[in-house]
Amino acid sequence: MSGDPAAFLNVDRSLTGRRWISRGQGVADGETDRAGLALAQRLGLPDVLCRVLASRGVDLDAADGFLNPTLRAALPDPSHLKDMDAAAARIARAVRDGETIAIFGDYDVDGATSTALLHRFLGAVGGKPRVYIPDRMVEGYGPNAPALLALKREGASLCITVDCGITAFAPLEAAMAAGLEMLVIDHHVAEPTLPRAVAVVNPNRLDESSPHGTLAAVGVAFLLVVAVNRTLRQAGWYAARPEPDLLQWLDMVALGTVCDVVPLTGLNRCLVAQGLKVMAQRRNAGMAALADIARLDEAPTAYHLGFLMGPRVNAGGRVGRADLGTRLLSTDDPAEAAALAQELDRYNTERKQIELAVQDQALAQVEHHADGPLLVAVGQGWHPGVIGIVAGRLKERFHRPALVIALDEAGIGKGSGRSIAGFALGPAVIAAHQAGLLINGGGHAMAAGFTVEREKLPAFRDFIAERAAQWLADGGQAVPVLSIDGALRPGGATLDLLELLGRVGPFGVGNPEPRFVFPAARIVAADVVGESHVRCQIADSDGRRLKAIAFRALETPLGQGLLQARSAPLHIAGHLRIDRWQGAEKVQLLIDDAAIAF
């Protein structure tokens, strides 16, 4: 297309159907290379590191802070958020007066960590917290009036909703009318009208000017904890009791932030960087048990949080008991933590089986019209706990926004959506709710959840599809791209390079793990491991070799290309990782993509 940046190594269509471009390309011709060179000259750092920094928009002024992230520099005054002072004052008063404080959380990782954080903090300062996590299957997402009124009858006078509540108008109205004072701590996109509450703290309120709209709910909850702690200190509350060390709970903040897939930039990146250090100390019994059940025997990284620990915490809310994750993260009893972690691990295994069955059916529905602006799969009796994961799989495979909907016997569909960069799905779902097409719905740019009646499904599908089609017509990226940070030879993939690149982490959305291409590499060995992984060795013209693996690739063009390319050179793209085996450490390439070289 005219105006598109040049393809990296002229790869316009790889084996996975993607166009390769240099990361940072399109800002200005050659600007990233010049910025990287300037960083290398001024800071005395290797060119490869500085090129990676420049491609992420890190300039000379920001380089030191980026390479050495500290909360002291990044943490804002919580009072900058609207209603924060009112929320902190009300919670502090409840603590001082011995009121029962209910915490109404969500069943995902962000919700579990947010709830556990507030529970631990309130318990540490002498408060009387009471946790409630709704059942996904019976109650669905967010506050509901029966549960709130039950909390009131059981003695709660204050209820904090966390990672939910921003669109729960009727339930909060009922609770407030019954005398249960409500505080909303959320990060999901708000509607123009806010629910009735004593305070609504949300960086994504439409009237909010905070620059921290990308915080996960657990990040907002941490700012609330900082604010309440300060209010209690100013009131002399710690004259007769020790003040808690708030940093001890950053491991939970890191877990929730990574697993909610918010950008790991700015404050989020600092929270995760410091939280990983806390997690490595294994002070939280639940976190330690989670690491053990996941067989994590090295310093944790954002990858471990997102792919090993997070799915297990999520499994309770998806297919098991909704409160298991919060209970695990809240306990100080190692034996209880081990038992809870084992239970979550069993649920995670069950979740994988359920997910695979739903995924196969969803793929069969969408694969014949995957070139449209929107993917929609609907199934009678599908488990609502896995539809979000399946939507993510469809989105990744076809590079289209995807909605997956589970219909129950009454004809009510619980849906989950995942989007691609540039198309704001959450606001589109909110607009559909405002148009009367949904029972409820909300979300953020990349993900959304909703409830819809069977009769309104066609109109809802068309509503979202029209918006997606318009986005594409306005220049949205219909052809998936793969961003490349540079080229390497197998001999250049060293442990020293990996240690150097680690300074750019933690990696995630907004701060992606560096991806390198090995140009015109030869496949000198290739075989299948496990059920669907393709393992190989690549070599350059000097004969230097590098072990590599492509996960879940066997039945894909990428996997087949690797297995059949013994004589033809390939450009191979992927991430570098340390492969630890029997005390030895070697570099391994995790293959993302490949393209025919000549």
Image (cartoon, helix red, strand yellow):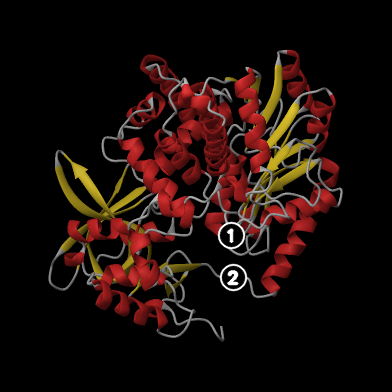
The N terminus lies in quadrant: bottom right
86 lies above or below 59: above
Pointers 2 and 1 in contact (C-beta within 8 Å):
yes
Of 506 and 205, nearer the camera is: 205
Q: Which mark is residue 420?
A: 1
For the residue carrying disc 2, how many other residues have a C-alpha within 10 Å: few (<14), some (14-19), or many (20+)? some
Q: Nearer the viewer, residue 327 or 277?
A: 277
Mark 1 lies on a secondary structure that is loop
- For the residues labelled 2 and 1, the Cα–Cα distance comes to 9 Å
Report the residue at 41% width, 76% height from top: 11
Determine the secondary structure under disc 2. Answer: loop
Amino acid type for the residue under numbered disc 2: Gln
Q: Residue at x 44, y 42 (%)?
A: 254
- Taking the image as drawn, is residue 143 in sight? no
Q: Which mark is residue 563?
A: none
Quadrant in which residue 143 is drawn: top right
Classify residue 398 by image quadrant. Answer: bottom right
- Residue 161 placement, left or right of 576: right
- Determine whether 275 is above or below 554 in the image: above
Q: How far across and down, in percent of the image, does residue 347 sit?
A: 49, 26
In the picture, the disc for residue 477 is 2
Q: Where does the image place residue 99, in percent across and percent down from the top left? A: 66, 18
Q: Position of residue 64 (x, y in %)?
A: 33, 63
The quadrant of the rendering that contains the C terminus is bottom left
Q: Amino acid at mark 1?
A: Ile
Residue at the image position 75 percent from the left and 42 percent from the top: 167
Q: Quarter of the image holding residue 512?
A: bottom left
Foreground pick, 87 / 41: 87
Residue 363 at x, y = what percent? 59, 49
6 relative to 149, above or below: below
The numbered mark, 2 or 1, whose residue comes first in the sequence reads 1
**Dot 1: within a 10 Å radius of its alpha carbon, few (fewer than 14), some, or many (20 or more) residues?**
many
